[in-house]
Image (spheres, helix red, strand yellow):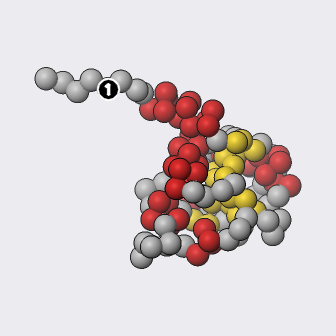
Amino acid sequence: MAQKITKSAKDIVKHALSSVTAISAEDALAQANSPDHVFVDLRDGAEQAKTGIIAGAVASSRGMMEFHIDPESPAHKPEFNLDKTFVFYCASGGRSALAAMVAMDMGLSPVLNMTGGVAAWKKAGGTLT
């Protein structure tokens, strides 16, 4: 008997996008140097290496994010202990919305999802290093 998939990836991303507070790339750009914000790149390492990341961002691939957030994990990244606003982003905004929803479920707060991801960031005049 074949699997019966009841929710599509598109459905799950749509739910995540409606569950997480969004920030436009333009508004995120204005916060890029803010000491109150931590940008988190959820793309995989190959994508990050190919295009670069936002200066100062935490590289945390979607597959490792939960382990990076969890202070009990050997893979924990101390940037997630900071009392700051976390701005999650990926290539276009879908993976980061999923990650942001899970991060909020884990207790990380506040978390924002950058609408349009790296593509919107570049269009708004943002650079990657």
The residue tagged 1 is 5
Residue drawn at point x = 82 percent, y = 58 percent: 31
Residue type, numbered disc 1: Ile
Q: Quadrant of the C terminus?
A: bottom right
Residue drawn at point x = 55 percent, y = 32 percent: 15
Q: Which element is circle 1 on?
A: loop
126 or 81: nearer the eye? Answer: 81
95 or 70: nearer the eye? Answer: 70
119 or 89: nearer the eye? Answer: 89
10 or 101: nearer the eye? Answer: 101
Locate residue 101, reporting x and y percent: 56, 45
Q: Quadrant of the N terminus?
A: top left
Image quadrant assignment for residue 7? top left
Residue drawn at point x = 71 percent, y = 68 percent: 83
Left or right side of 12 for 114: right
Q: Is residue 118 visible?
A: no
Position of residue 68 relative to residue 127, above or below, is: below
Residue drawn at point x = 45 percent, y = 73 percent: 72
